[in-house]
Amino acid sequence: MKTDDLIGMLSQDAAVGRGYSTILAAAMVAGIAGAALLFAMALPMRSNLMEMMDTPRVAFKFGTAVLLAVSAFGLVGVLGRPGIAGRGWSTALAAMPALILIAIASELAVSPSSDWMALLVGHNAIWCLTFIPMLAAGPLALLLLALRQGAPGNPGLAGAAAGLCASGIASTLYAMHCVDDSPLFVAAWYGLATLGVTVVGFLLGRSLLRW
Amino acid sequence: MRAAIAGDAAAYRRFLEAVTPRLRALARRGCQRSGAPEAEAEDIVQEALLAIHLKRSTWDSARPIGPWISTIVRNKLIDTLRRRGHRISVPIDDVIETLEAAPQSDPLERQDVERLLAGLNPNQQAVVRAISIDGRSVRDTAARLGMAEGTIRVTLHRALKALAAIYRRGDEG
């Protein structure tokens, strides 16, 4: 085909649909709404949620989950656009392991070593591993669909970022039910669930996000 | 490009025509540096044009357009070279044959139109033929094929997406 013919054809298709940012924002809002609905139907809130909110452990649990969702969402936005370096968002994400390590160190410092095992195992590790991926599935699917409208230079990485963001949303919701507040539990089980969702996001991204 | 984003076909055409020489220069340089035949550059130009077209909503109009375009061309260049990497495994006789055949083909028309069209459904083929090869407008094409203008637009858009996929598969497809 002649390049001039191609240009002629492209200019006949000049009308543009919705922008990438609009689609991404819509995917995020719909993903959160869907996951919240699923959560409301499947799980009860813990009874003492409000009064526990300002204890350091619970604050850490929600803080990391929200930070994960927000910074990974920022990264998804950047990774889907060619020619932009998203240093700010990557730095925010990279700060998370440090934050978690500090929380673990504080927990180990304030609790007797005889309790460590009980704190780590908690009450509901299996539920945590079941519900976080379940709650994350919807947001992950929607974010990947939105990313298909973008142009990620590294499809696997973009998929993984979508997985991290979906895990952040799911963890924030699940934390409203879960009564295991120790950073030991959160780092181990929320972390494991997040890792699983992120790997799925990476694999799906690698095959679905090529353009 | 900003006018083009708003749907101005003439402005969009001017933008694409203005950017093509630069795409060609980038693609040729990339081919030279990696030892790929220069004839391959025009395929990369066309793939990049299709990508710019289909992904233009990812350009943030508050930013300069240069880095956005360069990144798209670089990605397409890497894709193409990677595909070439697959082809290195073919027997040497075949390679000699392609090497000898390459200079004879028109560098502006390396991708065979018929082969590209074969990947589209009949409606898409008719629309692409009318608009690209006969140079008709959407309105003309609609009248000639007895279809609504909106239908032609949708068909054209889907055909362009399908073409991008055909390019992406390259010689493997």
Image: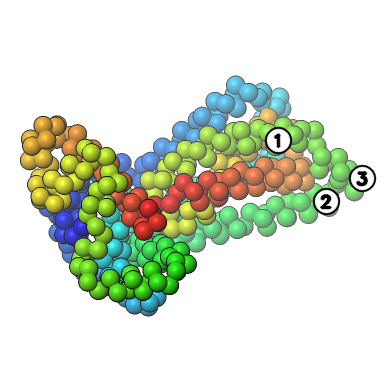
**Discs 3 and 1 lie in a common subunit:** yes
Q: Nearer the viewer, residue A190 or A197?
A: A197
Q: Amino acid at mark 2?
A: Leu
Q: Nearer the viewer, mark 3 or mark 1?
A: 1
Quadrant that contains the N terminus of chain B: bottom left
Residue at mark 1 to residue at mark 2: CA–CA distance: 22 Å
Residue in the image at 32% along x and 73% along y: B99
Residue at the spot of label 2: A108
Q: Nearer the viewer, residue A197 or B131?
A: B131
Q: Amino acid at mark 3?
A: Ser
Residue in the image at 90% along x and 48% along y: A113
> What subunit carries mark 2?
A
Q: Nearer the viewer, mark 1 or mark 2?
A: 1
Color theme of the render: rainbow
Q: In the image, is B95 to the left or to the right of B160?
A: right
Return the x and y of residue B77 as percentages of the image width and height: 37, 66
Q: Answer few, some or many: residues within 10 Å of disc 3's Cα (few below 14, many 20 plus, some between 14 and 19).
A: few
Q: Nearer the viewer, residue B114 or A205?
A: B114
Q: Is residue B163 above or below residue B15?
A: above
Residue at mark 3 to residue at mark 2: CA–CA distance: 11 Å
First-in-chain label (3 vs 2): 2
Considering the numbered disc 3 on the image, is that residue within a helix, a strand or a loop?
Answer: helix
Q: Amino acid at mark 1?
A: Cys
Residue at the spot of label 1: A128
First-in-chain label (1 vs 2): 2
Residue at the spot of label 3: A114
Considering the numbered disc 1 on the image, is that residue within a helix, a strand or a loop?
Answer: helix
Q: Answer few, some or many: residues within 10 Å of disc 1's Cα (few below 14, many 20 plus, some between 14 and 19).
A: many
Q: How many marks?
A: 3
Q: In the image, is A95 to the left or to the right of A81?
A: right
Residue B113 shows up from this direction? yes
Q: In the image, is A6 to the left or to the right of B27?
A: left
